[in-house]
Amino acid sequence: MNRTANRVIIDDTTLRDGEQSAGVSFTLEEKLAIAANLDAIGVPELEIGIPAMGDEERDSMRAVVALGLKASLIAWCRMTEREIRLSADLGVDLLELSIPVSDQQIERKLDRDRRFVLDTIARHVRLAGDLGLRVSVGCEDASRADKEFLYQVAEQVQASGAERIRFADTVGIMEPFGVLEVIGDLRAMVDIHIEMHAHDDLGLATANTLAAIRAGATHVNTTVNGLGERAGNAPLEEVAMGMQKLYGLDSGIDLTRIGPVSQLVEQASGRPVGWQKSIVGEGVFTHEAGIHVDGLLKDPANYQALDPREVGRELRIVLGKHSGRKAVVQAYGNLGIQLDALEAELLLGQLRRLCERTKRSPTPGELSRLYLMLEQSGRTGYGQRRDA
């Protein structure tokens, strides 16, 4: 079943899995600001914390609930009676009850067997339902589970009354073709919602998430900037834009406002966003190479698959070692200096040497000084000395 004709819900877990990134710790004020900003740009679901972490965590979750956001709010729990009961009065819309489903984790983490997992799901989903709570079952380490057992788990999840099953690529080992197959099998097997949770250990979290959508997933997990444990999770900005550009799916998220949200999470997490990070990186709409700049000046679509304005950005042309004369002429034109062809050629050599030395683009002040030096040398005006 192909879901590309229907809406897919993004469940952002920046406040839970994002904060689990080693060394990251949000203050209450930061949590509230991140939640409010994600809600303001239209993110439909937010996973906001782990009740078992203690009173302070639960109080912070209640504070997020008290904001009265439009987004549905989710608490993440291990599948135990204690954690379910700790979540009962938080006011969240859904519980994510997680349990390992791979033999690796069932045997070497829980010291249990497959029967225990199936019985635990049946018992605890019903308990949560009796407490008036909606439930999603998170299949931890699903990507390493025996497929036949995973399908038994899915059937048990549905039979027990949960409304959603989460396929977690916990250690980030999946690839898109495998995701397409396993999510497609689950879609054919159960009628409940299916959620994809992808980690980026092999750099495939976004690709795997989009493959899950194509296979029939109804929900997908993301984090802002791809924050998360180890290599992180599928980035919100990449998944939402991929859904739009590749599948024509509207996530409901206003990506023209993603920049300030990215910067907020960058600051709160202490994790700088890479210069070339797709969508939100400082340099992703910046061009230097002469061939590209020539094409961009004729039509930006020549070398931009994504219009920067779609994500609240603008095209930027900078000078560097690989620049051509047209870029030099434009840069000086922006400073109110009109160059002829020979002036541009002479300055280009100076600019290349400057960039090699400084490892960056020249500043406006440096451009002005280079032109002043050219004037003082008498090599301006069609290559003729001014006093000739």
Image (cartoon, rainbow, N blue to C red):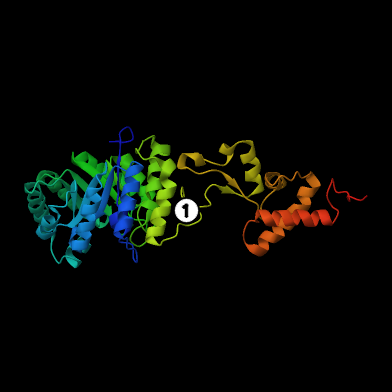
Residue lying at 40% horizontally and 38% vertically, measured from the top left: 244
Horizontally, residue 283 falls left or right of residue 163, namely right
Quadrant (top left, top right, bottom left, bottom right) of the N terminus:
top left
Horizontally, residue 53 falls left or right of residue 266, namely left
Closer to the camera in the image, 78 or 52: 52
- Alpha-carbon neighbours of circle 1 within 10 Å: few (<14), some, or many (≥20)? some
Residue 353: percent from left, percent from top? 71, 60
Residue lying at 34% horizontally and 63% vertically, measured from the top left: 24
Q: Amino acid at mark 1?
A: Lys
Residue 283: percent from left, percent from top? 53, 52
Quarter where residue 69 is shown: top left
Q: Secondary structure at mark 1?
A: loop
Residue named by callout 1: 277
Above or below residue 82? Residue 181 is above
Whether residue 150 can be seen here: yes
Residue 78: percent from left, percent from top? 17, 58
Horizontally, residue 351 falls left or right of residue 222, namely right
